Image: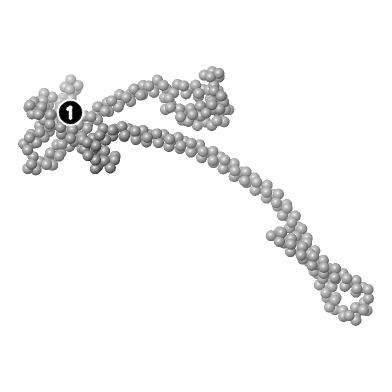
Amino acid sequence: MASGDFCSPGEGMEILQQVCSKQLPPCNLSEEDLLQNPHFSKLLLSLSQHVDESGLSLSLAKEQAQAWKEVRLHKTTWLRSEILHRVIQELLVDYYVKIQDANLTSEDKKFHETLEQRLLVTELAQLLGPSQERETHPLLGLEKADLLELMPPSEDFVWMRARLLLEVEEQLKKKCFTLLCYHDPNSDSDSETLKAAKVWKLAEVLVSEKQQCQDAKSQHKEQMVLLEKKSATYSQVLLRCLALLQRLLQEHRLRTQSELDRINAQYLEIKCGAMILKLRMEELKILSDTYTAEKVEVLGEEFDRLVKEYTQLKQATENKRWALQEFSKAYC
């Protein structure tokens, strides 16, 4: 595909991502990968013109569709014969269950016996197969002609076949009604005419529901792919966030550690000054308690100076104690 055929960058990326997610499932490429490899992106876009959504080439997809069509045709043919065979077997089983019933007429017995005889001979003839295709000796030395001699009289067969059509129709109708009631339990109380009308549309309803289920599965699959992509992106973002958080914690710890050390040093300095003042206070208090008023007069100016110093120290101690309390509150 020529570069001139390329859409705008935004549209091109959107088309390429649809191609990678639908027509080329193994290519789990992001928009960044496509932008970094433009020639590979053009190759993928060109390749999408020659494959369908399943990844098959258009010619193989056409052959596959034709093959599936033939398979469905053969399957339908086989199902028809298989259904007819099972219905006939059920008729015979029901007959043997009711064989002790005195209400069975001679026509009922004749019908079921003729049906059973015809069915057995037909099945045995199928087991023998065409004589020209056999390479070994026939089973028990029997030929197909030997089995045909066991067929019921043609008049009985014609009569049995006419009644068999009615019996099969009745059995199939019962099965259809059973299937309808299973699919829609509310139909159980409907009249036979209404049930027949619903059965006529039941196939279309089932096909529609099947298509809805397939569409739901396809949407679920697409959602799971999208969820996986988002989970991968979420994990990457989460790892980046954790790395960023770790870096922020380290930087914050280093920055606050120095500030914490400075505050601790200032706190210890204030506390140490307060202890020194407290010791001086105790010393002056001892001197004050030791000397009486008469002794103070003899001491003179020197003691006045000590008293003045004591007063100043007491005031400074009070100030330091207040500052230490306020600092402790702020530190806590």
Using the image, determine if residue 65 lies above or below residue 222: above
Relative placement, left or right, of 198 versus 246 is: left
Q: Amino acid at mark 1?
A: Leu
Which residue is painted at 90% across and 74% down in the image? 303
Which residue is painted at 80% across and 67% down in the image? 317
Quadrant location of the C terminus in the rendered image: bottom right
- Residue 179 in the image, given as x and y percentages of width and height: 26, 38
| Count of numbered labels shown in the rendering | 1
Q: Is residue 130 visible?
A: yes
Relative placement, left or right, of 66 versus 320 is: left
Which residue is painted at 69% across and 49% down in the image? 254
- Residue 75 in the image, given as x and y percentages of width and height: 27, 28
Q: Is residue 277 visible?
A: no
Secondary element type, mark 1: helix
- Residue 194 in the image, given as x and y percentages of width and height: 24, 37
Instruction: Say which residue label 1 marks.
Output: 127
Residue situated furthest bottom in the rendering:
294
Using the image, determine if residue 64 lies above or below residue 214: above
